[in-house]
Image: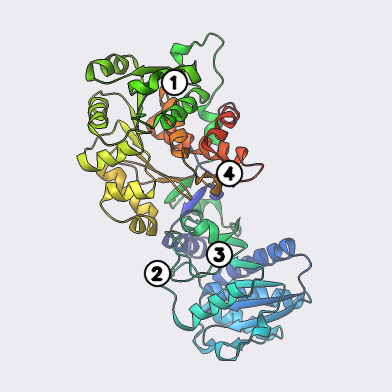
Amino acid sequence: MSLTRPQNRLYMAAQVRELDRLAIEEHGIEGFELMMRAAHAAFEVLKRQWAHANKILLVCGSGNNGGDGYLLASLALQAGIKVNLIDAADIKNLKDDAARAHQHWLQAGGKGWSLSRINDDLFDVDVIVDALLGTGLQRPVSGDWAQLISRINAAHRPVLAIDIASGLNADTGQVMGVAVTADVTISFIGLKRGLFTASGTGISGKVLFNDLDVPPGVYDQITPATSIIDDAERQQLLTPRTADCHKGDCGHVLLVGGNTGMAGAIQMAALAAARTGAGLVSIATRRAHALQITTACPGLMAHAVESIEALQPLIQRADVIAIGPGLGQDAWANMVLDQVLGSGLPQVIDADGLNLLAIKLLQHNRWILTPHPAEAARLLQCSTADVQSDRFTAVADMASQYGGVVVLKGNGTLISESGDDKTWLCRQGNPGMASAGMGDVLTGIIAALVGQGLSLAESARLGVYIHANAADSASIDGQRGLLATDLLPAIRQWVNP
């Protein structure tokens, strides 16, 4: 799928700096001109978001981010807004465009307060503008600047972050010790991927984008590190069915799981597969559950499987197998997993299927793995904190180590395919999804898409997108108390564009 809009591209900080350099050196746009454009764009956001703001606080650092802040402060002052400004850095050390921006601020009649002179009265404003730290932060914030960030957060005022919230790692979305919590972030030239995963979404607030009128040719020279899944792919892949379509054309999904006492997980996965449009949905489960599932859901074909001989005929009739929901880790779980892994069919592996796979340490390109951070940590033999500290590296490492396609679930779900340097990110979804069974529903959705003829990578991306949007649709009455089964009716809405 071609992505031509910068809003769908996510970059690493070094890539954005390169975009900036290309705009300056190859297209003749002065750095100070870009800085002025950024200030105007941020000021327009300030006026639009907080139209009645009469008094603001600017917190300016030493780099270009601070320069943007000084120019925005000048615009606000000229517009009749009262401006408090904190010079967080020693103004004698400002260089190049940042020094020029500071001089512009002084010429506009502005003055600043150094860190040693700040007091609580400075924070008694309508809006705080964070222009302290930019995208180059690589070590934890400490000392006076850490205390300043804490004071910004403690002021409980609306915050506009310039380019990125100070203290947030632009590449990973990790908080570097302490970070400003913004209500709105206005990002320039290229969207930074750390804004949209891990802590980035909560820290950044509403993210807006302005390309500062950088020529389109600049973007053709840099391949984005990550792309956002958008609705164009859904429209492209989920074409209307032909009039003579029958269930055999729509894929036979086999779901394996539901060990003793865990029938609900495999049942939810199967229902999700059916709602996503699978022509036939079969379940291989323990004998104790087969009858109750069939009785509760007549459209599902639940089979009692206690042996290899009972499982093999089901595998032979399937187009794709999903395994893991309610699987457990006992002898039965290992038996059915070994048969699935040896089937040669496309596979979606989740939950205890992943926990067992972490022990087996296999690799092939026929599967989609869908770990949450704790399962990812077991697959990578590291800690959950390690995974969350750099989710992009974690998902790429799993794809490299295990092959196939990997979906790293969580805030800003990521998708990576073995052999492909690009990562995909889903912006949709909400905290209501932090409830049991959500992953089981995703497993069923993805498996149904594979069964309908999409590639593994397409199925993973589109499945994550449908799942997240269904959760957003289902949470219209509130996120707290959202159940996995609440997504089932909404899935139909998102598979019928």
Q: CA distance from mark 1 to mark 2?
A: 55 Å
On the image, numbered disc 2 is attached to which residue? 138
On the image, numbered disc 4 is attached to which residue? 481
Q: CA distance from mark 3 to mark 4?
A: 35 Å
Q: Which residue is at the front of the view, 37 or 199?
A: 199
On the image, numbered disc 1 is attached to which residue? 292
On the image, numbered disc 3 is attached to which residue? 163
Q: Which residue is at the front of the view, 122 or 332?
A: 332
- Does label 2 or label 4 sit earlier along the sequence? 2
Whether tag 4 and tag 1 are in contact, CB under 8 A, the answer is no
Q: CA distance from mark 3 to mark 2?
A: 16 Å
Crowd rating for badge 1 (residues with CA inside 10 Å; few <14, some 14–19, many 20+): few
Whether tag 3 and tag 4 are in contact, CB under 8 A, the answer is no
Give the structural element (helix, strand or loop) at label 2: loop
Crowd rating for badge 3 (residues with CA inside 10 Å; few <14, some 14–19, many 20+): many
Q: Residue at x 34, y 42 (%)?
A: 420
